[in-house]
Image (tube, rainbow, N blue to C red):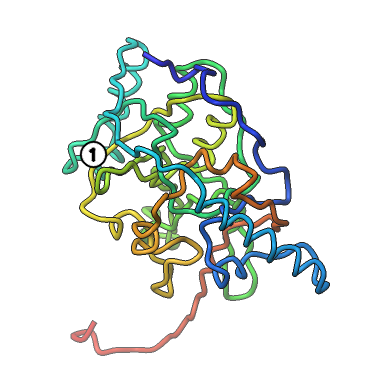
Amino acid sequence: MDQVGSTSAKPKTIGLPVPCTQRVLAGWLRADHFAMYPAQGNTPAEITWHQAKHAHAVQSVSQLPTVELGPTPAIEITDASENEWVSEIKKGVDFLKYYSHLNPIVGYVPINEITVFQPHLRSHHESAPQTQLDILKWCLPSTFAAHVSIRTEGNRILLLGNDPTFQILPPQSDPNGRGILIPIGANANWVQVKRVSGRYILHNGHHRVASLAAAGHTLVPAIVSDAPDLEHVIPLQANRQYRPWWTPQELLGFPRPPRVIDFFDPKVTMDLPAEQLMRVVEIRMDVQQFQLPVELK
């Protein structure tokens, strides 16, 4: 078996994006989609240079060779300590909640067969751990922490965090009768891969998989499950739009779909400035006081 720690993958021509930048798979972006990403400077000369670089990336994608996207069956985990970790995950509440009805596989997936639906890779990546067991725990954690700071301003509460996985759970009554509790939780942040139309689609964990690829690893531990179509994989935004990701129709229409390893090909990518972002959740309190007859309560 080609171990996850293997360095036999082809050498990467560029590493991960540096701080304050994002890497864009420019070769797959239409001109109007590419325009959504910030250019470096506003002078006509700089804008012209970026447009020319984008056009060159698009042309480079058209010249890429066709690839077999498989998918190769996920490689079974045979190490005893790794299997023990996976067994504990499968018993957890989160795993049962999301996967009890999907018959998933937990195993190692070839990185070079994984298609991405997210056109950009930001620089807030972590370095991959050293040992195979630590990589497994990094990609498939057993618990999910939400690191959030809280700020109160008048009648509103702001929750701020650099981790995009935190979420607000349904409010609860304080058992001591002193108020209302607003629990803060975290999404199940595993590396998750979906099989759609004979293709591995990376559903979650772009930065961890990219870090492994940049370090020369050829396999990634992931939870693998089937999805009937890409609409079940690519998330809609609040305005019912898929941007800044490709729509399912766009992704399926590519003669040569983008893969994780394409983030390391300078011919089809561009590194652009990017502000550091944080996730903000605003809770507003609109307090109204009135009286009702007892029988109407």
Residue, disc 1: 96
* Local SS, label 1: helix
Q: Quadrant of residue 45?
A: bottom right
**Which class describes the residues within 10 Å of circle 1: few (<14), some (14-19), or many (20+)?**
few
Residue at image location 70% in from the left, 51% down from the top: 21
Percent x, y for residue 216?
56, 24
- Residue 89 at x, y = what percent? 32, 29
In the image shown, does 152 or 240 lie closer to the viewer? 240
Residue 173 visible to the viewer: no
Q: Where is 240 relative to 26, above or below?
A: below
Q: Quadrant of the N terminus?
A: top left
Q: Is residue 157 visible?
A: yes
Residue type (three-letter) at the residue carrying disc 1: Leu
> Residue 284 versus residue 69: which sits nearer the camera?
69
Furthest-top residue in view? Answer: 80
Residue 126 found in image quarter:
top right
Relative image position of residue 279 (x, y in whole percent)? 57, 58
Seen in the image, is 267 located left or right of residue 86? right
Q: Is residue 222 left or right of residue 267?
A: left
Q: Residue at x 58, y 48 (%)?
A: 121
User: Picture quarter containing residue 240?
Assistant: bottom left
